[in-house]
Image (cartoon, helix red, strand yellow):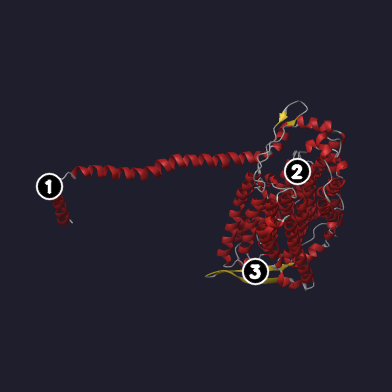
Amino acid sequence: MLHSIWLVIAAPLAGVLLNGLLGRHLGRAFVGLVGVGSVGVSFVVGALALIELGALPAAERSIGVGMWDWITIGSLQVGMTLRADALSLWMVLVVSGVSLLIHLYSVGYMGHEDERMFARFFAYLNLFVASMLLLVLADNYLLLYAGWELVGVCSYLLIGFWFHKGDEEQAPVVLVDGSQVAVPPNLNPPDSGKKAFIVTRFGDFGFALGVFLIWSTFGTLNFTDVFAAAPQVPTATITAITLLLFMGAIGKSAQLPLSVWLPDAMAGPTPVSALIHAATMVTAGVYMVARNHVLYDLAPTSSLVVAIVGAVTALYAATIALVQVDLKRVLAYSTISQLGYMFLAVGVGAYAAGMFHLTTHAFFKALLFLAAGSVMHALHDVIDIRRMGGLRRKMPVTWLTFLVGALALAGFPLTAGFFSKDEILLKAFEFSPWLWAVGLLTALVTALYTFRALIVAFWGQPRDWPLYEKAHESPPIMTAPLAILAILALLGGLLGLPIVFGVPNWLSEWLAPIFAAHAPAEKHMLSVTTEWLLLGISAAVALVGIALAYWLYAQRGDITARLTVTLRPIFVLLINKYYLDDIYNAVFARGGQRLAALLAQGLDKAAIDGIVDGGARLFVRGGAWLTQFEDGHIPHYALGMFVGALVLVAYLVLR
C-alpha cells in the first residue's frame, strides 16, 4: 500500500470531478456518498500504509514514490514524487480522519442548500482535502509549494461560498452605566475570502523567496538532498532560508502580524471553519517547520524567532477571545492562540510535542466548531452568545460534546489537551522560563474564555425566549461525528503517555526516525520533582481558570458587568482586537488607495500622459506649421529645394 499512496490524493480528486461534473444532475445522495466516500478511501489507504510502514525497521521508514517527471529545465529537475514516512503518514491520518467526520457532518448541515450549491460545496471540500494531502506528502519544495497555494485557493472559494450574503452588523455591548461599546461588524463572505487570500499572499511571497534561495544555494529542491547538504552551508544563509519559510507559516497559520484574516474566515459555512482550523490550512505552517527541522536546528536565531512569535501570538489571541460575543470567533481566536503553542513547541526544538498538540487540537477544535455549527443549525444561524442561554436542556448531545471539547481546550487534567499542552510547557521551561510563563498565563486565559463561552451559551436561563423555543437537537448525521470527536478529545492524550521523567511517549517514538536522525542528542535537564511541580502548576491553572469562569459568569454576573465598566479602556482595546485591523486599513488599504490616486493624478496624468500627449501635440503643431509651405506655388518649392541643397553642402563641407 505504501507504493500506492498516491491513491490518498487521487480519491478526493475523483470526488471533485464526479461532484463537479455530475453532482447537480444526480442529486444529494450521490454527492454525499461521493464526497464522504472519497475521503473515506483516503483514510483507509493512509491507515493501511501507516501500518505497513510500522512493520518496517525504523531506519527504513521512508519511501519515495515517484510517479513522473514534472519539470526538467537544464539542471532543474523536479519529479512528481511523494514521500511516505512517519511524519507524512501521520499527517495523512489526522487530515483524512478528521476531514471524514467533517464531510459526514456536512451532509446534514448543508442539506438545505439546493442541489447545485450542494454539489459545488462538496467539490470544493474534496479539493481542499486533496490539496492538503498533496502538501504533506510532497517530497520536494516545489510540490510542497503547489499544495501550499492550492490550499489557499480552496480557502478563498470556501470562505466566500455564500457569496450572496452582505455584511453582518453586530449589536453594541451595553454596559451597566448605560453606555455602549460598538462591536466591529463581520465582513461578508466574499470580502472575507478576499481578505484571507490577500493577507496570506504576504506570507507566501516570503515562502516563495525561501524556495528560490534554496534552489540557488543547493541546486536542488529535493528534501533529502537539501537536508544532507545543509550542514556545509553558512549559518547566515540557513537563517535567511528558514526565516523566509517561516513568513509563509505566519500567513497560513495566522500568527502575528498576519493573524487578521482567520477570524473573518468564519463567514464561510461552519464545516469549512472546522476543516480550516482543525485539519487543513492553518496546520500547514506547523507541519512545514517540523518537516524542515534539520534547517531550523542549524539556525538557532530562526528557531528563537519562531518560539517568540508563537508565545506572543498565543497570549495576544487568547486575550481577544475573552470579549468576543460571536461563538465561532471565540473559537477562531482560540485556534490562533493554540497554533501559537505549536510554534512555541517547534521553536524550542520540541517537534514531536508540536505535532502531538497539532493532533489533539484537531480533535477538540473540530469538535467545538461542529458543536457551534449544531447550535447555529438549531437557532437559525444565530451565533451571538448574548442571545443564548439554557441550551443544555434543549440540546443535550451538543451540550455534552461541547463540554468535552471545552475541557480539552482548557487543559483539564487527563483530557487530550492536557497532555499535549503540558508537554509543550515542560519543553518551554527547559528552554526559557520566560516563555513558559507566557504559555502558562495563556493557559489560564484559555480556560477562562472557553468556559465563559460555554456557560453563557448553555447555562443559566434563556435570554431570547422566542429563539430558545425554536431550539432543537441536531439530527444523528450531525451528532454522530460530535460523539466520535468527543471520544478522541477525551482519549487522544493516550498517544502522549507517558510525558514525564524523560521517557519518550508513543508518538515521539513513532516520529523518532524523522526528528532524531539529524538532531543533536537531547539532554533532559529537569528533575522528576520539577516535572511533577510543573505538571501540578499547569493543572491547577486550568482548574482555576474554569472555576473563575464559573464564578464570574454563572454565579456573579454583576461583578463581570462592573469590571467591564471599570476596565473600559482595556475592554474597548480587546473588542477592537488591538486595532490591528484598523492599522492595516489605514496604512495598507486606505494608504494604498491614496498612493494609487496620487500616482494616477501625478505620475500617470502629469508625467506619462504629459510626455505621450505632449509629444503628439508637438507633432500636430509641427505638421500644421509645415502645411504653410504646401501652398502650390512653384517659387516656394524652389526656395525650399535651394535651402535644402545649401544645408546638405554645408554638412558635407564641414563634416
Residue that badge 2 annotates: 330
Q: Nearer the viewer, residue 430 or 515?
A: 515
Quadrant in which the N terminus is drawn? bottom right
Residue 516: image x %, image y %? 74, 66
Label 3 sits on a secondary structure element that is strand
Residue that badge 3 annotates: 81
Residue that badge 1 annotates: 634
Q: Going from the N terminus, do you reach mark 2 or mark 3 first?
A: 3
Q: Residue at x 75, y 43 (%)?
A: 330
Q: Nearer the viewer, residue 26 or 122?
A: 26
Q: Which mark is residue 176?
A: none
Q: Nearer the viewer, residue 84 or 341?
A: 84
Residue 235: image x %, image y %? 61, 61
| Separation (CA) of disc 2 from disc 3 | 40 Å
| Separation (CA) of disc 2 from disc 1 | 92 Å
User: In the rendered structure, which amino acid carries the disc numbered 3?
Assistant: Thr
Q: Is residue 170 left or right of residue 221?
A: right
Label 2 sits on a secondary structure element that is helix
Q: Going from the N terminus, do you reach mark 2 or mark 1 first?
A: 2
Image quarter for residue 450?
top right
Examine the rendering and report whether any part of residue 304 can be seen.
no
Q: Nearer the viewer, residue 574 or 390?
A: 390
Residue 446: image x %, image y %? 79, 45
For disc 1, the neighbor class at 10 Å (few under 14, some 14 to 19, many from 20) is: few
User: In the rendered structure, which amino acid carries the disc numbered 2?
Assistant: Val
Q: Is residue 456 left or right of residue 351?
A: right
User: In the rendered structure, which amino acid carries the disc numbered 1?
Assistant: Ile
For disc 2, the neighbor class at 10 Å (few under 14, some 14 to 19, many from 20) is: many
